[in-house]
Amino acid sequence: MMASDTATLPFVDRRTTARRAHVWLGLLLVLVSLVSLAVGASGTSLWGALWKLAQGEALTLTERVVLWDIRAPRLVMGICVGGALAVSGAVMQGLFRNPLADPGILGVTTGASLGAISIIVLGAALPAVVQTTLGAGLLPVAAFLGAWGSMLLLYRVSTRAGRTSVATMLLAGIALSALFAAFSGVLIFLADDMQLRELTFWSLGSLAGASWVKLSIAAPVILVSVALACTLGRGLNGLALGEAAAHHMGIPVERTKTIAILAVSAATGTAVAISGGIGFIGIVVPHLLRLATGPDHRGLLVNAGLLGASLLLVADMIARVVVAPAELPIGILTALLGSPVFLWILLRKRGLVDM
């Protein structure tokens, strides 16, 4: 075997591993989805309902409501949110060439939080026609507008003469996050006890507010954004070598960065708007996959979406049953599970651990 052939073997093995991971992670998501539909505080059984349908029997009203109106939209929301956060994290880590980057680094998360807090505290001052028209959708709409407003402001600050500076974007994102957090702090100071309780539960994250109406608005935005992000694999591979090297490889550097920013902002902003604050998915999932299947973003982005969706569904199932009939905020679980992994990543990066 020639030396050149030997040198390419690790790359071939990594690509093959990534493709196999598509299949296994896809099967895992299907399995977790079925279990998610079957798990809940209610005694309604998915398998019993499927058996009834197979026998040509009609489902009871309770079974239809629990399975179709409660668990099914919750399942779809978990897939959308988990996939969006994980893919966004993989894109950010590739764009900044840093395994500790996450979707919140752009300030989109704090922008969405500011929008949600503004509505919770000041929403009563809005015209009655606005409150009536949007109803329960007022909070996610405000969070979405806050996320997009922060993204547009960040893009304007970090772009000059048609060129977007990644370094400026990072620093501006940190500054805007601090500014939005300060405004949020002022609103929290003005909130009453009931508003503070609502703020606390929203910030901890949950899929309990899932509905088909909410998903009809949010799911298309997330799916289109994630699909766009998954086309950036070759561009992110080139950017890993530096912008100059990527340009010489024929990669449209500025277009890649622009699409990455827009896709991540839209996906993350929409996910936060409908689910609240859910952390660590965007950090942990891409890094673990990078260790398992390699750094090639052409396979990494798809695998991140599949694994992120599965992990969030597992966390949601635990949240539903661990303190049943009450429900534990899902952000608490992702933090409990993700923070030790994040610490391990940090120590490993500094060379303090070997595994």
Image (cartoon, grey):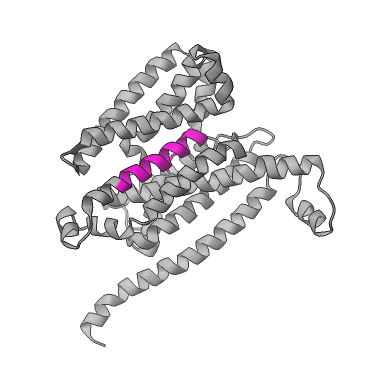
Quarter of the C terminus within the rendering: bottom left
Which residue is at the front of the view, 126 or 203? 126
Which residue is at the front of the view, 346 or 181? 181
Residue at 38 percent of width and 19 percent of height? 185
Query: Is residue 244 shown in magenta?
Result: no
Q: Residue 54's x, y, as percent?
A: 80, 59
Residue 276 is at least partly visible in this image = no
Q: Which is the main secondary structure of the residues drawn in magenta?
A: helix
Instruction: Choose top left, top right, bottom left or bottom right for residue 300.
Output: bottom left
Q: Residue 52's x, y, as percent?
A: 82, 54
Q: Is residue 8 above or below residue 284?
A: below
Residue at 61 percent of width and 40 percent of height? 212
Q: Left or right? Give the position of 215 relative to 176.
A: right
Which residue is at the front of the view, 160 or 325? 160
Q: Is residue 127 above or below residue 243?
A: above
Quarter of the N terminus within the rendering: bottom left
Q: Residue 195's x, y, as percent?
A: 52, 17
Which residue is at the front of the view, 21 or 214? 214
Q: In this view, does 30 lie above or below 146?
A: below
Residue 310 is at least partly visible in this image = yes
Residue at 47 percent of width and 13 percent of height? 191
Residue at 58 percent of width and 26 percent of height? 136
Query: Is residue 277 shown in magenta?
Result: yes
What span is colored magenta in the figure? 259-280
Instruction: Name, please, the residue furthest toward the bottom.
Output: 1
Marks counted in the figure total 0
Q: Residue 240's x, y, as percent?
A: 24, 56
